[in-house]
Amino acid sequence: MSLHKLKYITTLPVSIDDAWDFFSSPANLSKITPPEMNFNVRTDFKPGDKIYKGMLIDYKVSPLLGIPLSWQTKITEADAPNFFIDEQLKGPYSYWHHEHHFKKTDEGVEMTDVVEWRVPFGFLGDILNSIFIKKKVEAIFEFRESKMKEIFKFP
C-alpha cells in the first residue's frame, strides 16, 4: 500500500484570525465540500465551537457512487491560529493525515493543506487511487478553493 500525498496552497485576502475562525469551526466543513459528496457533520456542535486537540468529529459522506460512509477524525494537534492536524480514526481510507497551515503574508493568509493517505486493498487500492481516488481528492481541494473565493469574496 503506497502512501499518497497532495499539497495545496491558497492565498486568502483575510487576516490570519479570520481564516482561523472560519477553518477551525467544524460547522463550516460542509460549506467547502462538494455537494455531491453529501457531507454531513454528525457531531453536535454549538455555533462558535472551535476545534481543539483531542476533538472527535463524526461525519457521513458519500465519496463514491452516492454510497454513504461513516467517517471519524480526531484533531491530533492544534496551535491557533497557525495550524491543526486531523487524522482519520474510522472511514474509507486505511490512513488519512491532513495538515492545515496558516501563515500571515502581505496579501493576507497563505493556507497550505498537506494530505497523506493510503487506500485499502493493497495493490488494487493503489490502482483505484491512480484511476480516480487521487483525482477525487484533487477535485475536493479545487472545489474548496472556488468556494473560498466566493465566501471570502476575492477574484
Image: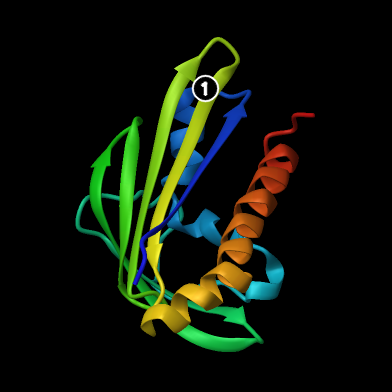
Q: Along the line of sight, which residue is nearer the eye, 21 or 96?
A: 96
Mark 1 is surrounded, within 10 Å at the Cα level, by few (under 14), some (14 to 19) or many (20 or more) other residues, namely: some
Q: Position of residue 109 (x, y in %)?
A: 52, 24
Q: Along the line of sight, which residue is nearer the eye, 84 or 57?
A: 84
For this view, does 4 lie left or right of residue 82? Answer: right
Picture residue at 41% right of the left edge, 60% below the top: 46
Q: State whether residue 32 appears in this view.
A: no
Q: Along the line of sight, which residue is nearer the eye, 90 or 134?
A: 134
Picture residue at 74% right of the left edge, 33% below the top: 153
Q: State whether residue 43 appears in this view.
A: yes
User: Which image quarter is the N terminus in?
Assistant: bottom left
Name the amino acid type tagged 1: Ser
Report the number of numbered marks. 1
Q: Please identify the quarter of the rendering in which residue 96 is found.
A: bottom left
- Secondary element at tag 1: loop
Picture residue at 21% right of the left edge, 51% below the top: 53
In the rendered image of this protein, does residue 51 appear above or below residue 79?
Answer: below
Picture residue at 52% right of the left edge, 76% below the top: 127
User: Which image quarter is the C terminus in?
Assistant: top right
Task: Check disc 1 and report the residue beneath it.
Answer: 15
Q: Position of residue 82 (x, y in %)?
A: 34, 30
